[in-house]
Amino acid sequence: MSLSAVCSGSTETLALSEEKTSALLRAQLISDSMGAYKYVSELWRKKQSDVMRFLQRVRCWEYRQHPSIVRVTRPTRPDKARRLGYKAKQGYVVYRVRVRRGGRKRPVPKGIVYGKPTNQGVTQLKFQRSKRSVAEERAGRKLGGLRVLNSYWINEDSTYKYFEVILVDVAHNAVRNDPRINWLCNPVHKHRELRGLTSAGKKFRGLRGKGHRNHKNRPSRRATWKKNNTVSLPRYR
């Protein structure tokens, strides 16, 4: 083997070792900068791992033994709850809500729908709102004195989906004196989950996007359709 070939091989080996060293240093820097909640978040991103699958399966069995709406002492996903506004202080509570999966049947007695044949369907109808929005609605109806702040998914099986709903007691002084959350004390935020004002509500209303491609979603799809399909013929006087 010639001297030039040996030199080129040693140069390539040195370059590869430098790349590996820099990659290890970058990984070390990233791990050093990661906080506790970042580790929890990364764990929840790997839901198909053996650990998470076993943990979720055991938790789901426990959830099935409890009522459909039950208070929990602390969030199952603390990183997600804090991103959505939860604080471990007085005035904040978390409830777990169970919602049955699948479509929505038309609520008619004995499946009799009066009207035209085009409206005769009872099954295979799809509800327009998400399961998370339904969970917020049920929690808000059961706990009328609290305000729904937000919610997030925690688990599901073949029959149910489970969500945790963050609620706030707006009568508590710890909430009323906190400038970061006391906007929720305003009476206009009563039952915001029933009027599509939470994050889940705005999503099914189509209000997540911005720009010229979303003009037909504002102020609502129905209002835009009505404006575009109404003929206005003002009378000449």
Image (tube, helix red, strand yellow):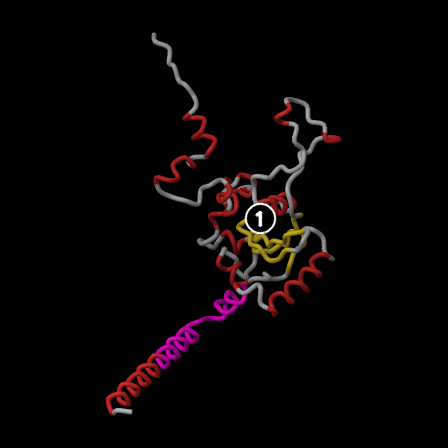
Which part of the image, by quadrant, shows the N terminus? bottom left
**Residue 24 falls within the magenta-colored stretch:** yes
Residue 230, quarter of picture: top left
- Which residue is located at x 44 percent, y 45 percent? 208
Residue furthest toward the right?
A: 110
Mark 1 residue type: Arg
Q: Which residues are magenta?
A: 20-44
Direction from residue 68 to residue 203 in the image, left or right: left
- Which residue is located at x 55 percent, y 43 percent? 193
- Which residue is located at x 62 percent, y 65 percent? 53
**Residue 61 falls within the magenta-colored stretch:** no
Tell me the residue that label 1 is attached to. 132
Q: Residue 79 at x, y = what percent?
A: 51, 63
- Which residue is located at x 34 percent, y 9 percent? 236
Q: Residue 231 at x, y = what percent?
A: 41, 19
Main SS of the magenta segment?
helix
Q: Residue 182 at x, y = what percent?
A: 48, 50
Graded by Cα atoms within 10 Å as few (under 14), some (14 to 19) or many (20 or more), the crowding at tag 1 reads many
